[in-house]
């Protein structure tokens, strides 16, 4: 498998959940994000299948990608990604979850994988970023609580 050129993408935020994952990536070169995801998923599938002596598919569905075309959506999406473990009830405080980039934004990283400058530059300071991320929780939680009432929630 051929490697992608160095710095083809920047990871802005992520969250690994028990049954899915979110990656917010910045495309730095004219290489499709589909190629990156294919490489990640193929490599992980090979690792998983070998480790657990498994054969066949590891991932259930195709991945979804969304173009982020304005700053408001970039900020919303970052908060949404970081709120996943709390909304799902895995933790009560976001900094308790090790499998998310949220701790990197707190400057207490479990891992240091993200390019945080683009996101943090949208705020006066780190506290404003954290407050903005927390404010999104109630909106997401309320929406999740109401999803079952929607006729067309697909």
Image (tube, grey):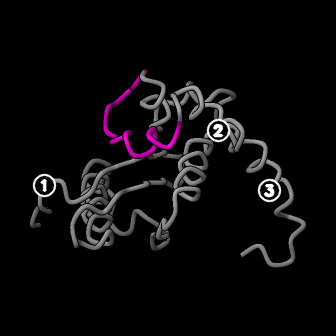
> Which badge, 3 or 2, comes first in the chain's sequence?
2
Please state the horizontal and vertical placement of residue 92, each as a whole percent of the image. 69, 28
Please state the horizontal and vertical placement of residue 143, each as a whole percent of the image. 80, 56
**Residue at image coords 55%, 48%:** 81
Look at the image and say whether residue 112 sits in the magenta stretch.
Answer: yes
Left or right of 42 in this view: 15: right
The mark tally for this picture is 3
* Magenta stretch: dominant secondary structure: loop
Q: Nearer the viewer, mark 3 or mark 2?
A: 2
Please state the horizontal and vertical placement of residue 47, each as a whole percent of the image. 25, 52
Which of the image's four quarters has the N terminus?
bottom left
Q: Nearer the viewer, mark 2 or mark 1?
A: 2
Which numbered circle lies on residue 72?
none
Dividing the picture into quadrants, the one containing residue 39 is bottom left
Instruction: Tell me the distance, in whole angstroms, between the alpha carbons under discs 3 and 2.
Output: 17 Å
| Residue assigned mark 3 | 143
> Which badge, 1 or 3, comes first in the chain's sequence?
1
**Residue at image coords 31%, 52%:** 48
Q: Secondary structure at mark 2?
A: helix
Q: Which residues are magenta?
A: 108-123
């Amino acid at each position: 498998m051929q490697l992608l050129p160095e710095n083809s993408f920047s990871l802005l935020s992520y969250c690994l959940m028990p049954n899915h994952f979110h990656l917010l990536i910045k495309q730095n070169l004219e290489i499709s994000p589909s190629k990156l995801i294919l490489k990640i998923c193929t490599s992980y599938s090979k690792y998983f299948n070998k480790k657990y002596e498994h054969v066949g598919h590891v991932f259930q569905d195709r991945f979804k990608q969304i173009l982020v075309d304005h700053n408001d959506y970039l900020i919303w999406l970052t908060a949404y990604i970081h709120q996943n473990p709390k909304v799902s009830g895995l933790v009560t405080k976001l900094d308790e979850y090790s499998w998310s980039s949220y701790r990197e934004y707190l400057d207490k990283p479990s891992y240091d994988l993200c390019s945080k400058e683009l996101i943090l530059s949208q705020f006066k300071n780190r506290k404003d970023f954290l407050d903005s991320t927390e404010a999104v929780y109630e909106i997401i939680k309320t929406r999740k609580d109401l999803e079952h009432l929607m006729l067309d929630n697909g």
